Each structure stands twice: as structure tokens, then as C-alpha cells.
Amino acid sequence: MSTQPILVNGEWRPSSGTSIFRAQNPATKEELPESYPVSPWPDIEMALRAASEAYEIIRGWPGDRFSAFLEKFAEEIERGADAIVEAGHLETALPISPRLKDGELPRTTNQLRQAAVSAREDSWRLPVIDQQNNIRSMYGSIGPVIVFGPNNFPFAFNGVAGGDFAAAVAAGNPVIAKGHPSHPRTSQLLAEAAHRAAQASDMPPGFVQMIYRTSHEDGAKLVSHPLTAAIGYTGARHTGLKLKDAADRAGKPIYLELSSINPVIILPGALKEREEAIVTEFTSSCLMGTGQFCTNPGLVCLLAGEEAERFVGSVADQFSNAPAGTLLGAGVDQNLRAGIVALQRAGAEVVTGNQPADSARYCHSNTLLRTSGKAFLENPHGLQTEAFGNCSLVVVAENIDELQAILRTLEGNLTGCIYSATNGGDDNAYNQVEPILRHKVGRLLNDKMPTGVAVSPAMNHGGPFPATGHPGFTAVGIPASIRRFAMLQCYDNVRPHRLPAILRDK
């Protein structure tokens, strides 16, 4: 079977490279038949030059031009939904329903349409007009944007269709998408829909482009290239930091979503009040999607006592009785097992799980570990290792002072949650831990597990390092997410007829 083409400069064309790869079906470990190219530097350079040429054309276009593309793209995705969902299912083993067809695909088209509304309204630009000094400013487009998609959201975070893509386009930028090698066919179908939408909305050839895979060296060269304006990346920490190093050295803004263990603090009064419900909520959240969410609750902090012991025992029972889901691929499987080993070496003990589950597919038994607050404080770095998958660590602190000390050692996270009694019995403890946790996370929750991320203007899907590379930006939540791919533009004493319309006096 011939190697699939790449989308560069308005055409589906053969790659100039000779290296290929194939995806696997994680549910069977079988290799899928299509071959995809590993693009060498000439492919990438061609895409960069085409994107730069496209930007020269679209720079200064009104927002409704980009809205028209985004809305048409959403329609094209819906028109091809069955094939896209089937490809996503084969390449990730995520269930067709309710996950892909009923959840993630509608979320993806909703993001595109929200971005279209914001682009049309120009609400993301934040115009400021100082009439006295005749100085005006607003956010404007920045130039070609590179988007790296992750493996765990084949639609909603895909490099050629996800939230970063939608935000970059809404800001008026061309995009070069780097697909994830776990789901190349899914990315190809989404890119085909984007290409049709670009043609229907009269976009220049280099407006939307897509390559499947590159070498690490060429990836670093791509993010640091003079024609690259900004980068969005969602994925593993070690890869993201290598790209960040290359981008930083070249002065390129790069927005990273890297890792998060999402601490959940459950205070004693909450367990006395509704232990069974919290156990079920936590188990459902931790095992949903086989734990393959960046908001998976990977750390639970309890205060020592009968309530804590009952909670650990009940969660262990539910973990043991729940089926082990399928992991996204060999890499996730290996990294999950390595993460569990690292946690054990750091002082955690296995309560349940940590056994092979089914050799016919990529999976690992639901794993619960525990450690004491004292042990955690002796090795806070090791015990914050992310075991990405169906695994979580319980830390039992002796008292509120030890719990506060634990929270002070935490790295930055996307989310943090506190469960407390509804009758006010935990309020004193809450008031002691909340200010510490608030500073460590992008999104603070009460009495709610962190797994869901609503596509809302008020959402912050970000946080301090290493959850992201910058604590002031969000990957979800339009219009705020759009401004990652924009530059602040100031106009000083510019004649009125030369100003952008949004900066003119009414």
C-alpha cells in the first residue's frame, strides 16, 4: 500500500522522505494497514514558506473571514462524522459512544463555532483607546502558528481541529498542524475537512497544512525557525520541554500543556457525611477513559483517622472490581508502568492492582497506591511522579499542619479540589488549606472531581509550571485562549483613516 500524502501549500502531495510509520489498534495490538510518512526537513520548510506567504495575504483581514472558515470546517466535520469517529476508535480504542461520537466530536465542533463567534465579534482583541494622547492598542494576529496535538484527545485537541487550532485561526493566523503518530488516519480525515473548508472560504493555499510526524531534531528546528511565530503543544513533559528550550532560545512564544496530578483534598467531615458518594465519584473520575486525562485525579490527600482508612478500603474494592480499560498505545502502557515503579521507589506502597490485565491489548490493572504524609515530605519530588493512566496515590497526613506542609511542596497543577462537609464542620480546615492550594493550581474546585473541562469563556485550563509553560494563559476558554496566538499592537498618533476599525473614534 502506498504511503499517504501530506497537506502542504494547498495540495495533498507525497512526502519527500522515505521513512514511514503505521498506527496500531490498542485493543488488539495489531498494526493498521495505512503507511504514513515521517516528514524530513524539505517538507517542513515548504510548509513554513507556504504559511508565511499565506500570512502576507490574510494579514489584516476582518474577523468574519476566519469565522466563515471555522463555521464551514465545523460543518465539514459533521458531514464526515461517521468516518472520523470510526478512525478515531480504531486508532485509540476509545469507545464510539458515548466518548467519541456523543462527547468529543460535538465538543470539537462547538469549540470551532465558539471561536468563529469571537473572531466575528473581535471580543478577543481588547481595544484600548486613549483619546487625550491619541494612543490606541489592541491584540492582533502574530503569524504562522505550529500546533502539536496529543494522543488522548484525537478530535478536541487535534493539531488540525482542536482548541489550539481554533484559537490560532480565530486570531487570524495560518496553522501548520503536527499530527500525533497514534492517530494519523483521524488527523488525515480532519485535515481533509479543513482543506475543503479552506477552499470553500477562499483561503490561500498555505492557510491550513498538516504533517504527520517529524524527527525530534526537525521538530526543534521547526519551533525555532524565523518564519514560525508561535507554538501550541499538548503532550508529554519531556518532549514539551525540549521544544520549549528550542523555542525559548529563538525567542518564540510556546504554550505548553505538560503534566498534572490534580490533587484532591478530602476533609474528614465530608467523608462522615457522604463517604459512599465520594468514593464512587473518585473511582469514576480516576478510571474514566482509563485515567488518560490531563485532569485525572492522581493524588488524594486525607487526614488520618477511621474515615480515611474506610475511604482507602472502599476505593481499593471498587478499583479491584472495575474492569481495566484499554490504554492508548504501547508508549502509554510503558510510561504508566514506569510511573508506578517510580512511585514505589519513592516510598509508595501498592494497595491494589499493579498487575498485567490482558496481554492481547494495551492495559494495566487499576492501581491504587498509598503513603504517609511523613514519607511524602521526605521525597515530595519522587512522589509527584505522574503515572498517566488508571492509577492514583493516596497520601494520609497525621494532622492539618502536615497536610499544609504537603501542599506547600506541590508542583503547579491544572486543577485542585477540596471536599468538605456541607454543615460547616470542615470550614476551619478548609480555610487553612485553600490559600496554599489556590496558589498551586489553575482551576480550584469544591466538592467536584476535576476530570471534566467545560468549553466556557470562564474556564482556565492552565496553571503554574509544570502543568503548563506559563501560568497566565489557558488552553480552553474562548476568547482568552485566542490571545496566546496574538501580539499586542499599539498605534501612536496614527491618522484616523489608517487605524483598524475597532480603534477608531465612534
Image (spheres, rainbow, N blue to C red):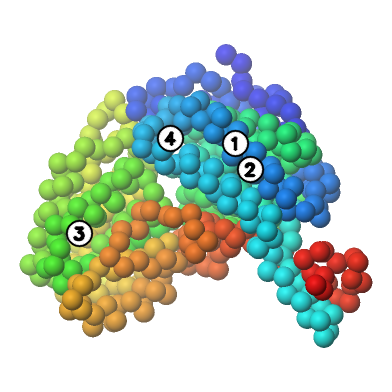
Q: Quadrant of residue 337?
A: top left
Please determine whether, in this image, residue 231 is positioned above or below residue 395: above
Is disc 1 in contact with disc 3, using a CB cutoff of under 8 Å?
no
Of the two numbered discs 3 and 2 on the same chain, state the one appearing first in sequence.
2
Q: CA distance from mark 4 to mark 1?
A: 15 Å
Please determine whether, in this image, residue 276 is positioned above or below residue 388: below
Residue 101 disc label: 4
Left-right relation of 488 to 345? right
Q: CA distance from mark 3 to mark 2?
A: 40 Å
Left-right relation of 156 to 491? left
Q: Residues within 10 Å of mark 2 (few under 14, many from 20)?
A: many
Q: Which residue is mark 3?
A: 278
Residue 75 disc label: 1
Of the two numbered discs 2 and 4 on the same chain, state the one appearing first in sequence.
2
Amino acid of disc 2:
Glu
Q: Quadrant of residue 504?
A: bottom right
Residue 148 visible, this orientation: no
Residue 132 visible, this orientation: yes
Of the two numbered discs 3 and 4 on the same chain, state the one appearing first in sequence.
4
At x 31%, y 68%, the residue is 446
Amino acid of disc 3:
Ile
Amino acid of disc 4:
Lys
Coordinates of residue 136 in the picture (x, y in percent): 79, 74
Of the two numbered discs 1 and 3 on the same chain, state the one appearing first in sequence.
1
Q: Quadrant of residue 361?
A: top left
Q: CA distance from mark 3 to mark 4?
A: 29 Å
